[in-house]
Image (cartoon, rainbow, N blue to C red):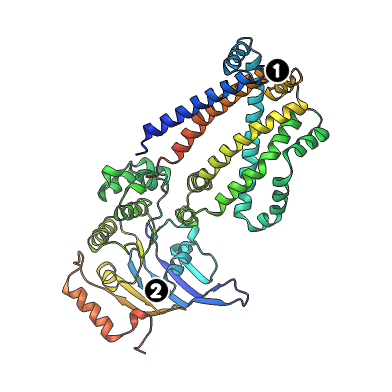
Amino acid sequence: MATGIKINIKSKVFQTNNRKLQSHSAISKLKFDVSKGEFCSIIGPSGCGKTTLLNLISGLDKNLNGEIIFDQEKKVKDIRIAYMFQNPRLLPWLTVLENVEVVLSKEQRDSGRATEILSIMGLKKFLGYYPGQLSGGMQRRVALARSYSSQPELFLLDEPFVSLDDEMANKLRDMLISLWTNEPTTIIFVTHDLREAIYLADRIIFLSSAPSRVLLDKKINFKRPRKLDDEKIEAFRKNIISKNKKILEGVNTNV
Amino acid sequence: MLTKKYLSSVKGFSFIFLFILWELLSNFSNPTTFPSLLVIVKTLYSEILDGELIFHLGITLYRVFVSFFIAMILGTFIGMLMGNYKKFDTFFDGWNILFLNIPALVLIILSYIWFGLTEVAAIIAVSLNKIPNVIVTIREGAKSIDKSLLQVAFVYKVSKIKKFFIFYIPQLFPYIIAAARGGIALIWKIVLVVELLGRSNGVGFKIHEFFQFFDIKSILAYTIAFVIVMIGLELLCFKPLDNYSRRWRT
């Protein structure tokens, strides 16, 4: 089901359509692998090209110098990918249930998967509602349900819980973990919140500021289920920061 | 307070006022050129009874619909292309401005000269008059499409047909409705002119005929019948469609 992924991006440059033809180098010599079923978190300062990276992986942006390959030499078009964006990106003219079903195959629809996962997310009563009638947190839950219902071989998340209050964000994090535990898949989770990354992931990759490359690749071996307020998480966080003070700003002071 | 009830009673009163005004004016002027509303309604009634009005109304409505659908389909298609592809837009923009500014009458006469005094020429003339307007509206819509939703369709590998009808068209729908509403209002007026100039049936032709005989009451009877049909269409067709397309808005 899940797929591993090998990322080797030599460079990714944006041409700004200026008279001077300025260009912005977003990624340079970025290389890492994510293994099958791994929960990998990517951390980097804002504007470092995290979203660009996800767009490249998902095939939304095809213009790169380098390659992204999945297990069995597959390309992005052969892989079932789910992508949870910063905004829920639901279709306002479809109901909650329809919003989930619209991305499913016929077999998935017939299996009643959409209703099942929406119920797990506590949205059973809201199947017939339109997104405009839901709160922000509920819209994110629908987006998460949509992503997971599609049985992705690779699941990309781009700061999906940003701008939610803590309680709602925690609830969604736990939902994500429980979905992932029941049906393991490969996850690439972009965030700028280190505590969130430590709480969720098996591994954190720290990116530099643009043009981004890997600064630090850190495994997290805490047993699951974890607790967000666990001292170990805080200690781990402090440890990373004390060793490498500016790592969250995308600068390596530890060379 | 301006309650709904109050406002609708104002509306009702304004119609009664118009009616009284009309009757007063007709009383003080020549009854053949300015007939009383009662006479007009009587004429309308007898025209309906002998089937003449229904026949011509039917013919005119048929022309309205055919040219409406042709204009909407072609206009929407071209408008989407122009809204989505910059090159296409740049190339055809000048043409469109040109067509927008050619008087309806010129297109009608040219069409009759080039294609003969035929049904096809009539339909072409009406459609050509409307297509540029449809293009302008749909192009605006196509330019304001939210691409982030189309990205969702792309990532989840939704089929092309589904992407078009579920992710794309609903975003365009308000613009399509606006184009259709404006379209039908313009088209039925042009159809009458087309009929007057080169057809031997339809409401426009009949009005022309009544004009020859100075039969004002029949002209107004036909006008009223047609206006009622068009208002009915707006209320029974476009309003519900519009409401349906907005059902998800809160």
What is the residue that sits farthest to the front in this orientation?
Answer: B28
Give the quarter of the figure containing the N terminus of chain B. Answer: top left
Which residue type does callout 2 highlight?
Ser
Find disc 1 in the rendering and name its residue.
B215
Where, by quadrant of the figure, is residue A197 drawn?
A: bottom left
Is residue A235 positioned above or below B239 on the image? below
Depth check, mark 2 against mark 1: the one in front is: 1
Which residue is at the front of the view, B41 or A47? B41
In the image as oriented, which residue stretches furthest toward the left? Answer: A231
Is residue A103 found left or right of B159 in the rendered image?
Answer: left
The answer to which quarter of the image holds residue B13 is top left
- For disc 2, the chain is A
Secondary structure at badge 2 equals: loop
Mark sitting on residue A46: 2
In percent of width and height, residue B128 lies at 71, 39
Residue B58 seen anywhere in this rendered image of the structure: no
Q: The residue under label 1 is which amino acid type?
A: Asp
Q: Residue at x 77, y 28 (%)?
A: B197
Q: CA distance from mark 2 to mark 1?
A: 78 Å
Tell me the chain of label 1: B
B207 sits left or right of A117 in the view: right
